[in-house]
Image: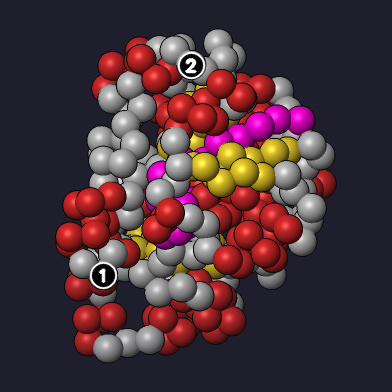
Amino acid sequence: MRHLISPLDFSVEELDKLLALAGDIEKNPQKYAHVCDDKRLATLFYEPSTRTRLSFEAAMMNLGGKVLGFSSADSSSAAKGESVADTIRVVSCYADIAAMRHPKEGAALVASMASSIPVINAGDGGHQHPTQTLTDLLTIHSLKGRLGDMTIGLCGDLKFGRTVHSLIEALVRYANVRFYLISPEELRVPSWIREDVLEKNHIEYKEVERLEDALPELDILYMTRVQKERFFNEEDYVRMKDFYILDMPKLELAKKDMYILHPLPRVNEIAVEVDSDPRAAYFRQAQYGVYVRMALILTLLEVKLPC
Ligand code: NCD
């Protein structure tokens, strides 16, 4: 039985297959409409979510399956003090696969060790978010036709942004990928990303504070929101929250074939005027999230694929 806890749980070859499957699902959705008729997905969300939870649920429904679950810690037995290990043991009796989001780092890993069904990490604190990474890889591949040979700028809250950590970890496995890490001093990537991921793999990267210094060189700009819920005090958040605002004058500096991604939700970091620029890809990215989660469910459940 397999789980998806970290973006490295799939090899590059397995990822290629998964992205190809997601591509086929996009082209031929009807072919997959009943492949999970007898399956159930449990969504165990201890933290707020719109896209991740609903895209998982939509993905399972598109495959003909059913969904059950909860969308906040207070509506589950966590409020009574139940551990994630006990919860997943019980959920294993009700569902065939589970997606879990939790504010504690490592929660999905702990759950997977007690589970008799595949567990998907749908975000564990400020640590990892591997299914957003699958979404991001499918988006980049669909827009650019490749995952290597490019300069990627990640901008905003690189310290607490779990989507950033997982995306960097996944992308360093492709040839000739360079990074601009664009953040205020206080929100730089954690040292495990710098040392164990970037330096260990001899990846070229620059840490800069001004978005304008990186923009002209980028093939992909990955914007992120300042992660309010991970700050210890409100004052620091207020000081940081509008540090970056991508607007049309700044976008003038970018290449014509650069694409802007954002895991969403957006707060102020991308001006609404940018949405109509052809380079804005964040809403398309949310759509890709459904195809890739369909492909992931099929892969982890080892469903026999229609020919
Ligand atoms: C992200 C998350 O939850 O980490 N959202 C998402 O899943 N699309 C990013 C964020 O909340 O800023």
Residue wearing tag 1: 232
User: What amino acid is at disc 2?
Assistant: Leu
Q: Quadrant of the N terminus?
A: bottom right
Q: How is the image coloured?
A: secondary structure
* Residue 267 percent coordinates (x, y): 26, 39
Query: Which residue appears at 24% of the width and 56% of the height?
Result: 237
Ligand 1 within 8 Å, label 2 CB: no
Query: Which residue appears at 67% of the width and 50% of the height?
Result: 170
Q: Tell me the distance, in whole angstroms, between the alpha carbons under discs 1 and 2.
A: 35 Å
Drawn side of residue 178 relative to residue 217, left or right: right
* Residue 92 percent coordinates (x, y): 49, 75
* Residue 30 percent coordinates (x, y): 56, 27
Query: Which residue appears at 50% of the width and 75% of the height?
Result: 106
Residue span colored magenta: 149-163
Please name whichever residue, 34 or 285, is drawn nearer the observer in this view of the structure.
285
Please name whichever residue, 93 or 79, is drawn nearer the observer in this view of the structure.
79
